[in-house]
Amino acid sequence: MIHVFGHINPDSDAICTAVVTAHWLSMRGMDARAWRLGEANRETRFIFDVAGLTLPPRLDIPLQNERVWLVDFTEPAQEPDDLLRSNIVGIIDHHRLGGLITQLPPEAHIRPPGSSATLLWLLTDADAHRALLPTLAVLLLGALLSDTVNLRSPTATEVDIRSATELGVLSGVNRKTFARDLLTAKTDVRGLSAQQLPDKDLKAFVIAGTNVRIGQIEVSSPSQVAPVMDDLLAALASMADLSGADLAVLMLTDIRASFSSLYFAGRESVYAASCSVPGMLSRKKQLLPWLESRLNQNGSSL
């Protein structure tokens, strides 16, 4: 059995693409099962509802000596605690290489399109495209549109645009309506506490030797979180303390106006003031290089 999963605090790409990857491996004659490494967010649940599919179960088995296939990450800080005791046999990812160590050479597919869903679609041939169930095409389309913010993110490429068109036809959904409702679900923060919001899409990195936690909250307007901003900043400071991170970053992204406001906490944030960065939508392609440049310039201090 090959166990397929994405990163902890999973987003739609990590869960949806894991499910379709398990199907793809099964079509290649391998016994594979998809898992998720955390609760599914509202957007991911929306995608599965449209597809008429059930979410994969939460990973609940020890990974020692198990064969695993990673989707949407290679960062050690984003992996389950016992991953290094497993045998990583495959990887599909569209992020930077994060320092993962494997026991044996894996089948690795790492390219820079806007989503891991896009990359999986590119890995399959025309016959596999025609044979893909519409329900699974919905999962790939949803993951692609989520990660590229409906193709508006700077991470979106020509192959993402082409793949979205092909998946839209195969899925049978009204793509305009689907994308609108997906973004509504993505930016729905109702009922989430100030402590839950930074964890909604939280990832860990080591940047210029600095242990960093970045939580991204995507909204259609900053007014959605304005009433709880003081509590959010307190939660950010608490996250830095409890995790032991050198730096905690809250990336509040307005997907309609295309800018992000950045807030900092932790011992390396002493000289960092909150700021807004026009055009910043992507944590991967924009915020990480932005942070790395400043941390390298200032010797692990903003």
Image (cartoon, rainbow, N blue to C red):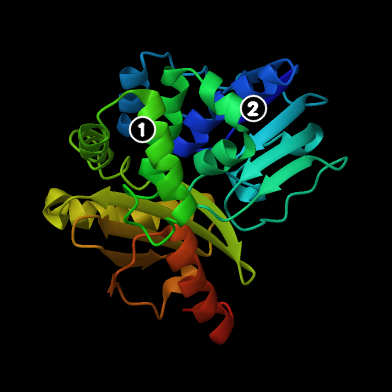
Q: Give the number of callouts.
A: 2
Q: Where is residue 184 drawn, in percent x and y?
A: 20, 38
Relative placement, left or right, of 166 versus 296 is left
Name the residue located 55 percent from the left edge and 25 percent from the top edge. 20
* Quarter occupied by residue 144: top left
Looking at the picture, tell me which residue is in the foreground, 127 or 107: 127
Name the residue located 42 percent from the left edge and 18 percent from the top edge. 135
| Residue 133 visible in the shown view | yes
Look at the picture and state if 46 lies above or below 231. Answer: above
Look at label 2 and name its amino acid.
Answer: Val
Relative placement, left or right, of 227 versus 23 is left
Looking at the picture, tell me which residue is in the foreground, 144 or 235: 144
Name the residue located 74 percent from the left edge and 36 percent from the top edge. 90
Q: Which numbered tag is attached to residue 168?
A: 1
Look at the picture and state if 145 lies above or below 1. Answer: below
Label 1 sits on a secondary structure element that is: helix
Looking at the picture, tell me which residue is in the foreground, 90 or 85: 90
Look at the picture and state if 204 lies above or below 29. Answer: below
Q: Earlier in the sequence, mark 1 or mark 2?
A: 2
| Residue 266 visible in the shown view | no
* Quarter occupied by residue 82: top right
**Disc 1 and disc 2: Cα gap in Å?**
25 Å
Q: Which numbered tag is attached to residue 4?
A: 2
* Quarter occupied by residue 264: bottom left
